[in-house]
Image (cartoon, helix red, strand yellow):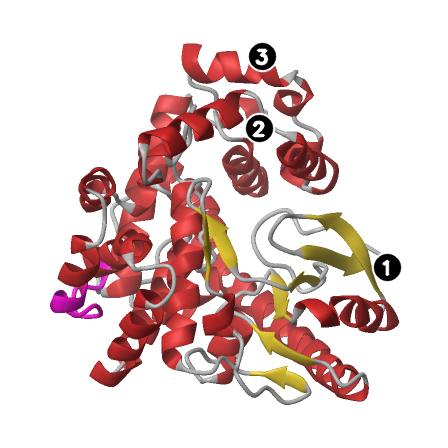
Amino acid sequence: MKESDAIPAPKVLQQALRSTTETLAAELASPGSVAPEWSELQWQTARAVAAIHGVSALLASRLRWSGPAEWQCFLRQQREHTLIRHGRMQQLLQALDVSLKQAAIPAVTLKGAELYAIGLYEPGERPMGDLDLLVRGPDVERATAVLHSLGFRESYPHWKHQAFVPEVARTPGPLGEHADNDIKIELHERVCERLPLDEIDISQIVFPARPHVGLNAYPSKAALITHLLLHAAGAMMWRGLRLMHLHDLALLCSRMTESDWTHFMSDAAGGPGVWWAMPPLALTAHYYPHAVPKHLLAIVAADCRWVLRRASRQYRLSDVSLSRLHIEAFPGIEWAQSLPEAFRYAVKRVRPDEEARAVYAHIVSYEAWASNSPWFQLPHYRRALRWVTSRPTRQATMHAVRAAFRERL
C-alpha cells in the first residue's frame, strides 16, 4: 500500500484529528484508566496529534493505560529524545550565561526554559523547540555577537524577533522530537503579539527592573503568566495553539496565589489591559476546571468584546490548533477590536505587505513542511482564491500526518 492510499479523505481525517485531540487533552488533564476504543486510523492520527501538540513525552509519563504496542513505542522514544535534547539545552544555557556575563549583558530566558527552572516540569517532560532570549534594545548588537561566538548565525528577521540557527544545520527528524534536531535561538528586544494587527506589548512587565548580567528569571510569577497567556492568545488567533501551552498555563495557574493574581491584574491594567487573556484562560478552564479562579475569569471576560467573548466560550483545542485541518480565509478576525481593524486585517490577508511576504518566504525556505509543498508554489492570489472557493488543507498538519502514516507503513 502506498502512503497516499493510506491517508484518508480530508473529511474523515478531520474527524480523526478532532476526536484524538479532544481525547488526549482530556486524558492529560485528568488521566483515566481505560484506553480509548479507537480505530487503527485514530491510533495512527493520535501520533501526529501528540507530536503537533508537543505532549508525547508528557503522555508517556502521565497516561495510566497502555494502548497498542506501536503507540507505546512512539511515546517512549519521544520521551527519550526529549530528555536528551533537554540535556543539550541545559548545556547551551550554561554557555550562554557565561558568555553574556563576560559581555556584561543582562538577558531574560523566556517561556520553556523558565518553566523548567522553577520546577514546573521534570527533565525531559516538556519539549523546547527553540530558546527564547529577551535583551534590551541597546544590547541587541552585542548579544548578536555573543551568539555568533557560540556558533550561531542569523536565519531570518521577524517583526517579533531575530532567529539564529547553528552554523552547521542538520536535517530535522520526521515526526515530533528528535535528539539531534537543531536548537534555534530567538533573540527578542520586545515581547509582544499582534491581535490581529494592533500590538499588545508587555516588555516592561517581563524585563526585571534591576537585572544582573547574564541570564535572568522573570521578575514575578505574574510576569510569567502574563507572557504565557499572551503567547497562547497569539497562537489561538493563528490557529496554532498547542496542548502543551494549555498544560503550561494550568500548572502555573495552580501555583498562583491571590496576591500573584492581583499583581497580574495590576500590571495588565497599567499596560495592555486584560481582554486578550480571556480566550486562553477560558480554554484552560474548560480542560482544567479547577486551575483558573472563577472570579478572575469573570473579570477578564468583562473586559473582552462580546464577539471574541462569545467565540471564546465555543472554542475547543481542535478549533484553534493545527488539529483544525482546513485553512481559513481570515483566521482570528474575531480578535479585532474594531471594524476598521477587522477591515485592515482582511485587506492584509488578501494583499500581504512586504513584511508578511518576507515571513512567508522564510517559511518556504526553512520549514520542512513547506519547502516541498505544491501549495506554496502557487501565486498568492491563487491561494487566496482557493481560501474562499474550496477547503484547502493546512500543509503543516498534513506534514505531521504523512510522517505518522509513513512510520506505520
Is residue 358 in sight in this rendering? yes
Residue 242 spot, x, y in % from top left: 42, 53
Tell me the mark number nearer the camera, choosing from 3 and 2. 3
N-terminal of the pair, mark 1 or mark 2, is: 2
Q: Which residue is mark 1?
A: 167
Q: Is residue 205 above or below residue 15?
A: below
Q: Is residue 352 left or right of residue 297?
A: right
Measure how far apart labels 3 and 2 are at the Cα level. 27 Å
Residue linked to disc 2: 3
In the rendered structure, which amino acid carries the disc numbered 1? Glu
- Numbered mark located on residue 154 in the image: none
Q: Is residue 264 above or below residue 199?
A: below
Q: Secondary structure at mark 2?
A: helix
Comes first in the chain, label 3 or label 1: 1
Is 175 covered by the magenta stretch? no
Q: Amino acid at mark 2?
A: Glu
